[in-house]
Image: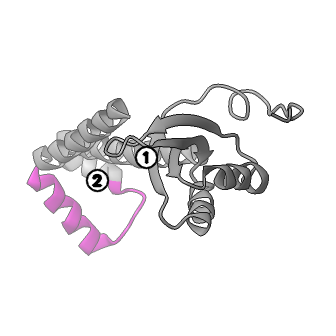
Amino acid sequence: MKKKLSSSVSVFISCLILLIILPNSSLKLLGMYLRHYGPDPRLLKYFWRSSPSGTIMLLITLLVIVLMIVSFFLNKLLLLGTNRTEMKIISSEASLIREAILSRVDRGVTILHGEGGYLHTPTEVILSVVSNHEMPRIERLARDIDPNCFIIVSQVTEVWGRGFSQGKHYAAKQNP
């Protein structure tokens, strides 16, 4: 994520630098031409004759802007729906919340056994990795069952295993 952010920032800064370096005379010529003749397909030819270096800088700047916009939307499009969220729910009603997640959301859960740091009381922690659009539903389920539950939400970069990188597999339940 940091690489994507730093590359986007560097492209944005490069674009700004190109806009600053772009000669003012070229922009003035473009403005004068547009005011006098209006938009015309022969604009680039006129602009090239007036200021070749300014034309090149303008085209590079426009290309960088277009590439930046396209890469931003492609990143959003490709990442949409693939982000995963890790939820840890600490509650005295862990068994009810676990059943609700399994039956109503059809997501797997893992029960971790924990201990309260202050009173040293044993507690159960429900761990589940869900898609971003399932997270609010699970949060509502947990809050409806136990309004005092403690929920930790973290973004996950990769998930491997059943239900994500492999197909779901429903094993037969064994009664304890």
Range drawn in magenta: 23-43
Where, quadrant-wise, is the C terminus in this rendering?
A: top right
Residue that carries the numbered disc 2 in the rendered image: 46
The image quadrant that residue 34 belongs to is: bottom left
The image quadrant that residue 121 belongs to is: top left
Q: Nearer the viewer, residue 72 or 16?
A: 72
Residue that carries the numbered disc 1 in the rendered image: 72
Q: Nearer the viewer, residue 119 or 112?
A: 119
Whole-angstrom CA distance, mark 2 to mark 1, is 33 Å
User: Would residue 40 be found to the left or right of residue 27 on screen?
Assistant: right
| Image point (68%, 26%), residue name | 161
Q: Is residue 36 magenta?
A: yes
Residue 159 spot, x, y in % from top left: 58, 30
Give the mark count: 2
Category of crowding for the residue at label 1, using alpha-carbon neighbours closer than 10 angstroms: few (below 14), some (14–19), many (at least 20): few
Three-letter residue code for mark 2 = Tyr
Magenta span main SS:
helix
Three-letter residue code for mark 1 = Phe
Q: Nearer the viewer, residue 70 or 7?
A: 7
Image height of 38 relative to 17, above or below: below
User: Would residue 44 be found to the left or right of residue 149 on screen?
Assistant: left
Furthest residue toward right: 172
Q: Nearer the viewer, residue 10 or 112?
A: 112
User: Would residue 150 be found to the left or right of residue 105 on screen?
Assistant: left
| Image point (18%, 39%), residue name | 53
Image height of 57 relative to 142, above or below: above
Residue 12 spot, x, y in % from top left: 26, 44
| Image point (14%, 61%), residue name | 28
